[in-house]
Image (spheres, rainbow, N blue to C red):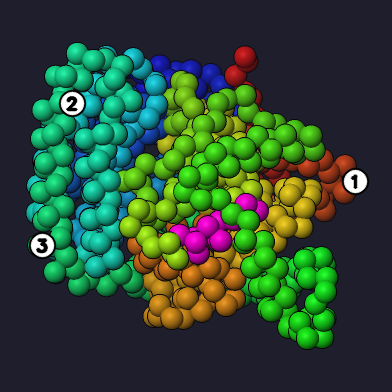
């Protein structure tokens, strides 16, 4: 019922006043029916998006369910192919194309990628994240959430059984990471549910035995991963050129072809290396005033840049201070954005938290915004302390990478004025269907965050020290795209990857080791940062050229993030049309 009411509301808030026609009506009916079945088939994603009708359910990974879902996807593809997209009006015109692209992506994933057969990390969505989603947000009283928590825990053994039946020969790195994350899931089942259960003591007592039973089932699963699956985890972590090219096209939804991405990344690498040296040179003279310029090798651009970065890395947080420091920086960055009038700051809460253990092992931080279907909710800026089993030397390397200045740039990316701001604005977008809410573009989202790093540095946030980190992060985004293609569509070795990251992009060894792991675990995602930022910067340049002295940065930024989170190519189209967004009245 909730979703139907939501769609009724959204239909009255279209971005266009053009009257709907019969093709609009047909598309909106298909989109409604597709999203309804999609959310039901992906209950964990529905919870994350903010539709809580399926909070007691878990994804069915059985071969029968997967075959049924594939058939459903093909049925909807046929229905969409019968629509004349040129006749659609307002938001429907673009949302029709977004939905078609995503249906095709679902079919590609089911027919060609088949991740449930070889990627044990797929199952963590049900084994851990499904529980965490019910605990992390106070979207309903504990008395309403706990029964769904119970139902999901009761279904976990079924998911484990399907994982054991489906998984055959995963890549070793995927199984090793699944083992680490399963331990996090065990800790979540035993201890991490307390924030919710403590709100209803009697229900907590009743759930104690199920918690232990769930933890035990996960413990047995971890042993199976270690003793059974790991010895036969001999799959190739490389996706392969053909599958990678297809996946990249779907994942990016970009006008930039694969060869053009490579060409632009390599050119941008040289340009950014020159820019970081130019920023480093005056800092070198500041921090090393007694040094002999000739002896210091100022002509050696790499030496100068590395020396300045090494000096800046000496000021860094620790496991004990990183979350508090990030909290302080959020307030600092928010004040800067408001003072410089860069973008409209949303009036919604943001909490800085330590990243849950079961989510660690892939990235240092993330922004967890409330789903676009959620009525209320906080955004979480999660920061990960280092794993307990890391040596002191590895911890030191990690925090030299994520030093005080880098934390500032990271905060821009994840929070202010990056993901937190953009996703809050996106949640205000209204259209006749939920297509744009459910199928958000990762390339647009990540590209906006990288663009914001550059925009804030251009405005002087944090001075040249933070600009050094922004340029270093830009080098990282470029290296990410090169890594992504070279690993999954090529044969890049670990040494070649480490040399690219450490010698060309100035990354600390600890960060490079973690990125080598992440690059093998994922495919196409690491390209979203560079491609998205490139498209955003191209878009801004075009607007500046078109408007000249009339260009207003705040007005521009607000408009770009007013259309939800569609691929950048569609934002470009909307801005060329001069489309304006109708927002709900407050």
Q: Residue furthest right?
A: 549
- In percent of width and height, residue 397 lies at 50, 64
Q: Residues within 10 Å of mark 2 (few under 14, many from 20)?
A: some
Q: Quadrant location of residue 203?
A: top left
Q: Is residue 413 shown left or right of residue 537?
A: left
- In percent of width and height, residue 304 lies at 72, 75
Disc 3 on helix, strand or loop? helix
Q: Nearer the viewer, mark 3 or mark 1?
A: 3
- In percent of width and height, residue 123 lies at 23, 48
Which residue is under mark 3? 227
The magenta segment = 395-406
| Quadrant that contains the C terminus | top right
Which residue is under mark 2? 150
Q: Is residue 325 shown left or right of residue 442?
A: right
- In percent of width and height, residue 40 lies at 26, 32
Q: Main secondary structure of the magenta part?
A: helix
- Per the rendering, the mark at residue 549 is 1
Q: Is residue 449 shown left or right of residue 180?
A: right
Q: CA distance from mark 3 to mark 1?
A: 66 Å
Do the residues bearing badges 1 and 2 touch, measured as CB atoms within 8 Å?
no
Residue at position x 57%, y 42% from top?
Answer: 326
**Where 462 sits versus 53, above or below?**
below
* Sequence-earlier tag: 3 or 2: 2
Residue at position x 39%, y 26% from top?
Answer: 137
- Per the rendering, the mark at residue 361 is none
Residue at position x 42%, y 53% from top?
Answer: 386
Q: Nearer the viewer, mark 3 or mark 2?
A: 3
């Amino acid at each position: 019922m909730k979703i139907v009411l939501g769609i009724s509301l959204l239909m009255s808030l279209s971005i266009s006043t053009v009257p709907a026609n019969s093709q609009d009506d047909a598309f909106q009916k298909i989109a409604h029916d597709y999203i309804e079945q999609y959310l039901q088939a992906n209950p964990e994603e529905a919870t994350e998006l903010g539709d809580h009708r399926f909070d007691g359910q878990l994804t069915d990974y059985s071969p029968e369910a997967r075959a049924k879902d594939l058939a459903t996807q093909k049925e909807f593809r046929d229905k969409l192919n019968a629509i004349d997209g040129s006749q659609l009006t307002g938001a429907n015109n673009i949302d029709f194309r977004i939905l078609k692209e995503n249906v095709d992506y679902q079919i590609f994933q089911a027919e060609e990628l088949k991740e449930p057969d070889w990627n044990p990390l797929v199952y963590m969505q049900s084994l851990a994240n499904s529980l965490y989603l019910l605990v992390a947000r106070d979207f309903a009283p504990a008395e309403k959430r706990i029964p769904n928590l119970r139902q999901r825990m009761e279904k976990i053994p079924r998911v484990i059984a399907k994982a054991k039946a489906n998984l055959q020969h995963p890549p070793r790195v995927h199984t090793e990471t699944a083992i680490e994350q399963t331990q996090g899931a065990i800790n979540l089942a035993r201890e991490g549910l307390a924030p919710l259960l403590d709100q209803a003591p009697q229900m907590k007592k009743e759930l104690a035995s199920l918690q232990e039973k769930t933890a035990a089932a996960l413990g047995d699963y971890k042993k199976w991963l270690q003793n059974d699956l790991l010895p036969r985890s001999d799959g190739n972590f490389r996706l392969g050129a053909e599958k990678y090219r297809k996946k990249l096209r779907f994942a990016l939804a970009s006008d930039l072809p694969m060869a053009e991405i490579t060409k632009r990344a390599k050119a941008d690498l040289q340009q950014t290396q020159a820019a970081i040296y130019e920023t480093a040179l005056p800092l070198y003279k500041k921090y090393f005033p007694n040094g002999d310029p000739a002896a210091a090798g100022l002509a050696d651009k790499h030496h100068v840049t590395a020396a300045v970065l090494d000096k800046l890395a000496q000021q860094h947080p620790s496991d004990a201070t990183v979350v508090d420091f990030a909290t302080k920086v959020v307030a600092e960055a928010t004040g800067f954005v408001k003072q410089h009038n860069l973008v409209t700051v949303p009036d919604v809460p943001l909490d800085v938290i330590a990243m849950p253990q079961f989510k660690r092992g892939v990235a240092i931080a993330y922004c967890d915004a409330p789903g676009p279907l959620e009525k209320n909710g906080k955004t979480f800026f999660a920061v990960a302390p280092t794993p307990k089993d890391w040596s002191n030397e590895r911890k030191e390397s990690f925090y030299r990478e994520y030093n005080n200045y880098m934390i500032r740039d990271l905060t821009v990316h994840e929070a202010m004025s990056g993901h937190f701001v953009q996703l809050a604005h996106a949640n205000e977008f209204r259209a006749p269907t939920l297509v744009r809410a459910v199928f958000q573009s990762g390339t647009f989202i990540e590209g906006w965050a990288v663009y914001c790093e550059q925009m804030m540095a251009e405005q002087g946030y944090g001075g040249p020290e933070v600009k050094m980190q922004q340029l270093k992060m830009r080098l990282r985004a470029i290296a990410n795209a090169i890594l992504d293609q070279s690993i999954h569509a090529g044969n890049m070795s670990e040494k070649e990857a480490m040399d690219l990251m450490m010698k060309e992009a100035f990354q600390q060894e600890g960060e490079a080791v973690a990125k080598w792991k992440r690059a093998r675990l994922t495919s196409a995602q690491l390209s979203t940062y560079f491609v998205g930022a490139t498209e955003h910067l191209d878009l801004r340049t075009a607007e500046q050229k078109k408007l000249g002295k009339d260009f207003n940065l705040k007005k521009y930024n607000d408009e770009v993030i007013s259309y939800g989170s569609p691929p950048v190519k569609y934002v470009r189209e909307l801005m060329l049309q001069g489309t304006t967004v109708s927002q709900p009245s407050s």
